[in-house]
Image (cartoon, helix red, strand yellow):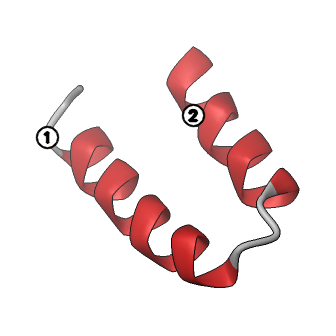
Amino acid sequence: MNKIWNIAIYARVSTDKKEQREYIPVQVENLKNGY
């Protein structure tokens, strides 16, 4: 659960939209892979 919340927090606090677009898909893939 902590990783999911960390993603949500990161998405909210990130002001760099480019960084946000690069970060979130990677984390989604990690969740799909069971990490």
Eyeballing the image, is 34 above or below 13?
above
Q: Can you give x and y, in whole percent of width and height, for residue 32 in the image?
A: 23, 47
Q: How many marks?
A: 2
Q: In the image, what residue type sits under mark 1?
A: Asn
Q: Are marks 1 and 2 in contact (CB under 8 Å)?
A: no
On the picture, is 8 further left or further right than 32?
Answer: right
The N terminus, quarter of image: top right
30, 22: nearer the viewer: 22
22 to 32, vertically: above or below: below
Residue on which disc 2 sits: 4
Residue 20 location (% of width, % of height): 59, 70
Tag 2, which secondary structure? helix
Residue placed at 72% from the left, 58% from the top? 11
Place residue 35 in its image quadrant: top left
Q: Helix, strand or loop at disc 1? A: loop
Q: Is residue 1 visible?
A: no
Which label is found at residue 8? none
Q: CA distance from mark 1 to mark 2?
A: 13 Å
Residue in view at x 24 percent, y 55 percent: 29
- Furthest residue to the left? 33
Q: Tell me the kind of residue under disc 2.
A: Ile
Crowd band around label 2 with a 10 angstrom C-alpha radius: few (<14), some (14–19), many (20+): few
In the displayed structure image, the side of residue 17 where residue 29 appears, left or right: left
Determine which residue is flagged by label 1. 33
Residue 6, by quadrant, is top right
Q: Position of residue 31 (x, y in %)?
A: 31, 41
Residue occupying the far top of the picture? 2
